[in-house]
Amino acid sequence: MASIKGLSITARYPFLPEARRRLAEYGITLESFNDPAYLKVVERAKRRILEAIERGDEIELSGLSDDDFIELASFPLSIAMIAAMGDKRLARRFALATASLTIKLLESEDPEWRDEIVLKIARDVFSMDVRQDARVIGGVSYGYSLGLRDYLRGALAFNRPEWKLVNRVVERGRVLVTSHELIRLLKDRVMEHVLSLIERVGKIGALPGPVEEAIKEIRGKMPAAVELELDAVKTGPETWPPCMRAIADKLMAGENISHFANFSFAAFLSNIGFEPHEIIRFYANRPDFNERIARYQVEHIAGLRGSRTRYTAPSCSTMKTNGLCVKDGALCGGVRSPLAYYRRAIRRMKKLDKDKDEVGEERGEAGGEAIRGSGADGDNAGHQQVSDNLG
Ligand code: SF4
């Protein structure tokens, strides 16, 4: 089979089941990395993680080693290192970079072999119901058909119209996809798979010295997480609808969310008075954060670029269609848009503040009376009356 940099398929796609089997034949355990003979593997595992931190989605094939064994063994070691570091944000960034690298590898495979490898990954790793189905319909060259369930599982995360089922060729419960589309669907699966591998590592005891050293170096190069205290942000999230709070929570935890969720949240914040630089802060923990792109998109949504029209936040029915409504609106008293929820919450808050002020003024007067009255009867009596007034 043709290869990139002379690497075998198990070295290029080290999450394949046969890569695990091949590595098991070498009899390597975590302790093996105490041996200086494996220093290059430790070095490559460290580079895998650092490249993920530095480049994320924009990782390059040029970072691949041309040594089959080093590629094969460094992948599980980097998984173990990330598990040991216990940083979820790093785990997601690494999963994203690995998924991007996989896609770039697949797209640069010799077309003669690509189908075979794509099918192998889709079936052997993800048990996807996929068949080769080469046809040209309406000028589009399809390469595969996917079972409806597998198609929807991936495509629901994409917001572009071409992924909507109504715009697809569906035959007897199967959806036709191009080679490029199938590879795109695999990207999200690879990312989930890598995250599950990291989670499955569980607790790790003492690590070999060279691995500890590598982890220390990685920690020193990790950007600090953006700590956004939700309760400290302007206008207070208590006035935000549950759908927007849920998106904010996910963003701050560094989780990836759909493009539509990103758009809705940025549009919502922009409409309630947040400046682009304040909105961007919410996105800084995303594994694929790129400040230049985020700024461009947020400024576009805020109407500072392009058509100069500020986008409004979507209606509740659109949020529901995109699976972003929380508890089917049961917490929102029948509002028709997240912005309507926000305006109503603000009105209530203002009314509450006004009521509090009025009560405070009344209590202030009553308290004054009580204190003034205490002069004749002694301090204790006065304190009693004040505390009575405060309820
Ligand atoms: S009903 Fe509307 S405002 Fe409430 S959670 Fe659903 S989409 Fe958001």
Image (cartoon, helix red, strand yellow):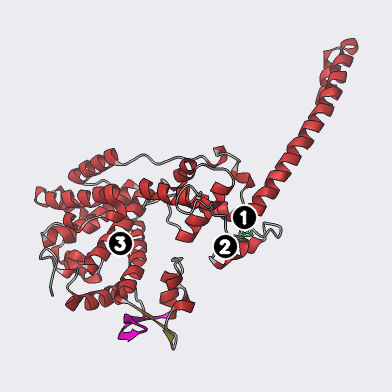
Task: Please check the rendered image and state whether residue 141 is part of the magenta-colored stretch, yes or no.
Answer: yes
Judged by depth in the image, the label closer to the viewer, 3 or 2, is 2
Q: Which of marks 1 and 3 is nearer the N terminus?
A: 3
In this rendering, the answer to whether 375 lies above or below 61 is: above
Residue at far bottom of view: 172
In the picture, which quadrant includes the N terminus?
A: bottom left
**Is residue 146 one of those drawn in magenta?**
yes
Where is residue 244? Give x, y as percent.
56, 53
| Secondary structure mostly seen in the magenta stretch | strand
Residue depth check, mark 1 versus mark 3: number of the one nearer the observer: 1
User: Which x, y percent locates residue 86?
Assistant: 35, 48
Mark carried by residue 338: 1
Q: Which amino acid does label 2 sit on?
A: Met
Amino acid at pointer 1: Pro
Disc 2 to disc 1: CB gap under 8 Å = yes
Where's residue 5, x and y in %? Answer: 11, 63
- Total marks placed: 3
The residue at 46%/65% (across/down) is 159
**Residue that numbered label 3 is attached to:** 99
Q: In which quarter of the image is the C terminus?
A: top right
Kind of residue indicated by mark 3: Ala
Q: What element carries label 1?
A: helix
Task: Specify the segment rendered in magenta.
Answer: 129-147
Kind of element beneath mark 2: helix
Q: Distance between the residues labelled 3 and 2?
A: 28 Å
**Residue under the point 17% across and 52% down:** 44
Q: Measuring from the top left, give residue 20's x and y in whole percent.
A: 22, 66
Residues under numbered marks 3 and 2 in contact, where contact means CB atoms less than 8 Å apart: no
Decide if ligand 1 comes within 8 Å of the CB at mark 1.
Answer: yes
Q: Which mark, by number, is residue 319? A: 2
Ligand 1 within 8 Å, label 2 CB: yes
Pick the front one: 337 or 287: 337
